[in-house]
Amino acid sequence: MSISVLPHRDELHVGTGRLYIDGQWCESADGATWTHVHPATNEEVTSFAVADATDVDRAVQAARRAFDDGPWPRMAARDRKMLLRRYIEALTDNADEINRLQSLDNGLPINFSSMYQVSASFAADIFDYHTGWIDKLVGDTIPHFTGAEYFSYTLREPVGVVAAIIPWNAPVFLFAQKAAPALATGCTVVMKPSEYASLAVIRMTELLAEVGFPPGVFNLVLGEGHATGEALITHPLVDKVTFTGSRAVGQRILAASADGIKRVSLELGGKSANLIFDDVDVDMAAMSAMGMVTWGMSGQGCVCQTRALVNRTIYDDFVDKAGTITQMITYGDPFSEATTSGPIINQRQLGRVMGYIEKGQEEGARLVFGGDRPGGELASGNWVNPTLFADVDNKMTIAQEEIFGPVLSAIPVADEDEAIRIANDTTYGLGAGIQTSDVKRAHRVAKRLRAGTIGVNGFMVMPNTPFGGYKTSGLGREGGLESIEAFTETKTVDVALTDSPI
């Protein structure tokens, strides 16, 4: 007996599998295709077109024309809002289908795929938030510094053609996180999803086309990063690149952006710490810490708190309780409501996760639970049992490098100062968690942590709050006013009010 996702494919509207360029669905120039393999079973689900450099050029050229000569950047705020409102309604009406396509994409359990923060409902809210800014993109009037007869003011204008590249772990959320502010500000977009998760994005693009966006405003190219993505980030007519993914690719994007001085927003992952103090409910702390890296995405989230820095007075109790939590995980058919956690996205990443687990044992960490793969009906998929390491030293590889799998490293700490020092002792700085019942400590510690998003006794990303990282976790912020600013340029205008200006 084995699980299979293929019956669920037949229940869903699996899209055209084609590229969307200049308002038209089309095949790739060279006829190349990619076969989508589901990570839970390694079954071949469907195939779709792969864009080469010629296709990418066509898409960017279309976006360029739509920005330079088309109506979108010059459209009345009321009309642009009305069109985006229709799209929000379409997302809401098709939310269940999009969530299920996401599970067919990457193996997210359907209960998790439908949870607010990674769901189509959340994507609709992200679009709703940014749509609200369309008629509020105001500049400033500035008194002239010398008092001369000038009227000086600023305008906030769209940055231009945006290349948006998103990963496979939360494609629905990240589609909205990048497309919503870009479209709201009047930019045009060429989006490339991960080749491992394109189905939900294809459907979201179909809905964009159906509600009537002008040709060239939004374009979709599919394919691998080394070819399709490279052609997109190096294209001379792209004004801005917004990317979520690995640090190595982010570094490549930064290097490629130098030629045209492209604007760049990068969210590049993390090695977030969860600081657990001795005034907490240990059962709840263990549930929260272990759940963060095992439920849902199985640790395949950039902001997952994969280092638990636990006060020594509760450390042994925490490790015991966390080990118990791992036994509550249920693997299986992602479309079953009984399944709590998903598979690793592909076999290459599966090998990488298992390599880190082996490295942790070699370097002296104590394996408390897991560290292996399930057998039986799950053997054909990319599954890794939830894994807990104890007595980890922060200099170990598993404490310094992003594993992107269901692996938690527990590190004992003596006091608040040591917890903060160890939390900051990483090249990353995306997020951190603080678990304490002392409100003064919570604010004190949050201020000292070098990370972009801090969760105190909980954590949520919202459309109206900025999200991003310090250090090598990236550049810029997504969400809130800062995401609007990231897709605009500021123009200063000086108007002489006299016939004899200085």
Image (cartoon, rainbow, N blue to C red):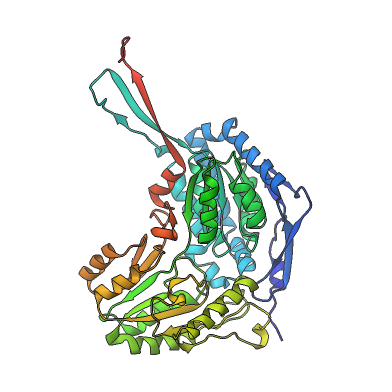
Quarter holding the N terminus?
A: bottom right
Q: Position of residue 417 (x, y in %)?
A: 25, 73
Q: Residue furthest left?
A: 440
Camera-side residue: 450 or 183?
450
The relative height of residue 56 versus residue 174 in the rendered view (above or below) is: above
Q: Position of residue 44 (x, y in %)?
A: 73, 69
- The C terminus lies in which quarter of the figure? top left
Quadrant hosting residue 188: top right
Q: Which residue is painted at 53% across and 34% down in the image?
A: 73
Residue 24 seen in the figure: yes
Residue positioned most to the top: 499
Using residue 194 as the reference point, say whether residue 76 is left or right of it.
Answer: left
Q: Is residue 387 above or below residue 55?
A: below
Residue that appears at 78% across and 50% down = 30
Quarter of the view holding residue 445: bottom left
In the image: residue 366, left or right of residue 357: left
Residue 202 in percent (x, y) is at 65, 55
Name the image quarter holding residue 385: bottom right
